[in-house]
Image (cartoon, rainbow, N blue to C red):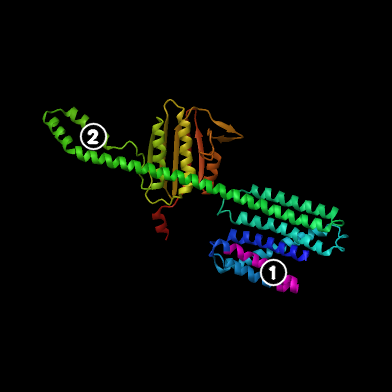
Amino acid sequence: MIYVILFFLSELCDSYCIYRLIRGLSGECRVKHVWEVLCYPVYGLVTGAVYLFWNLPLLTMVSSMIVLFALTMLYDGKLTARIFYVFLVCGLLACSETVAMVVMGEVPMYAASENMQYANIFTVYLSRLIELFLFETIVKVGGRKKREFHFYQLGILFLIMAGCVYLEVVIYQEIFARKPFFVTITSVVILALVILIIWSYDMLTQQYQKAKKSDMLDMKNQVYKNELTILREQEEAVRRMRHDTKNHCLALRELARQGENEKVIKYLQQVLDNVESEHIWMQTGNPEMDGFVNYKFSQAQKLGITCSVDARIPRGLQLNEFDLAGILGNLLDNALEAAQGCTDAWIRLSLSYDKQVLNLLLSNSYQGKLKIRNGRLLTHKWDTSKHGYGMESMKRSVEKLQGQFMVEHTTDQFTVHVMLPIYHSADRESQG
């Protein structure tokens, strides 16, 4: 009875590994998340029951492939992709079992003959541990476009798995002959702990991504709020001008009759100063980009920083607002912070678009004190939870979008040049 329970528990662990693989590589799920999760234990129960009742390898493999194909139907995708996932899972399962058998082949088996069932279960859980590593590797590498991924994560995972395999083998060699049940349960606990570690890491990663998106949404809301304030101020200014237009015309006519040309020019300049808004720096027809620049520069103006923009970009750029917030928003934050301590503080932004490439050149004054560690430029941010992700992080974000990130600085000027491949709506129409 204990053997059957432990065997089906191993099948549930197998189902969890397959769930992570198929869900990580497939498209959108067609059913609710609850039903999606409940479907995977069916795979373990079916394949486990077929193996225990008939013990025919061919029948077990066929039933496994049928249920696997049914699981792929839960997600959007092509038939070829579904077939590929089925063979991928079967291939990885075969690899993990082979590696486990090779490892166990190097261990003296004098104690296994007396406790064959426990030895078999131990080997099964060892193969599940190896299977988990193989599946996680495929998910991390194959699904890196869906989520942030660094290859050092695989190194950490490999060290954890290698350490666990070594620990299990040593325990098996030293204790199995005397306490086979204890050793088998230990392998179960080790696998459960590794699964818990991976699950916890994924939960923390998801929470980080949610917090990151929440920060960007807060910034976006502030941008829209600032744009709304600007529009209201413009509307109020236009309303006042319409009301005063007649009086202005009468005053100008009287000055012109008297030949007071200098007073006419001075009066007209005052009228123009009232018409022109001091709060709008950029109006390119790209709301996200205009909003970020106007919002950040309005903050800079309140701090006494002189701002200027030279933007020559068309309407309809295919911008990703989250990428924009992570790159442009944080670059402007860095420039604003660096310029604050200067006597003559200024920020200049230049934007141009040519051959499907957005060129961003941001320059600002600074005090000439840079933090450089191990050849890397560090920011001066005192609260990393509320500010940007650092120069190196922004550089990685740009490179992730297949762009280029360059930094230049003198004793009193800091310049960042970013080039991003961004489509324009007209470009897509011409390609179509």
- Type of secondary structure dominating the magenta stretch: helix
Residue 91 visible in this rendered orientation of the protein: yes
Q: Residues within 10 Å of mark 1 (few under 14, many from 20)?
A: many
- Residue 299 screen position, x and y as percent: 41, 35
Q: Residue furthest left?
A: 257
Q: Which residue is mark 2?
A: 271
Residue 45 among magenta residues: yes
Which of the 4 image quadrants contains residue 130? bottom right
Query: Compared to 359, does 95 lie above or below?
Result: below
What x and y, as percent, mark residue 291? 39, 43
Whether residue 56 can be seen here: no
Q: Is residue 355 left or right of residue 178?
A: left
Which is more N-terminal, label 1 or label 2?
A: 1
Q: Which residue is mark 1?
A: 47
As helix, strand or loop, the secondary structure at mark 2 comes to helix
Relative image position of residue 359 (x, y in whole percent): 44, 44
In the image, the segment drawn in magenta is: 35-59
Q: CA distance from mark 2 to mark 1?
A: 83 Å
* Quadrant of the drawing holding the N terminus: bottom right
| Viewport quadrant of the C terminus | bottom left
Quarter-of-image position of residue 361: top left
The number of numbered discs placed on residues in the rendered structure image is 2
Place of residue 405 in the rendered image (x, y in percent of width and height, measured from the top left)? 51, 42
Q: Does residue 380 sit above or below 118 in this rendering?
A: above
Instruction: Look at the image and say whether residue 244 sits in the magenta stretch.
Output: no
Q: Residue at x 71, y 74 (%)?
A: 59
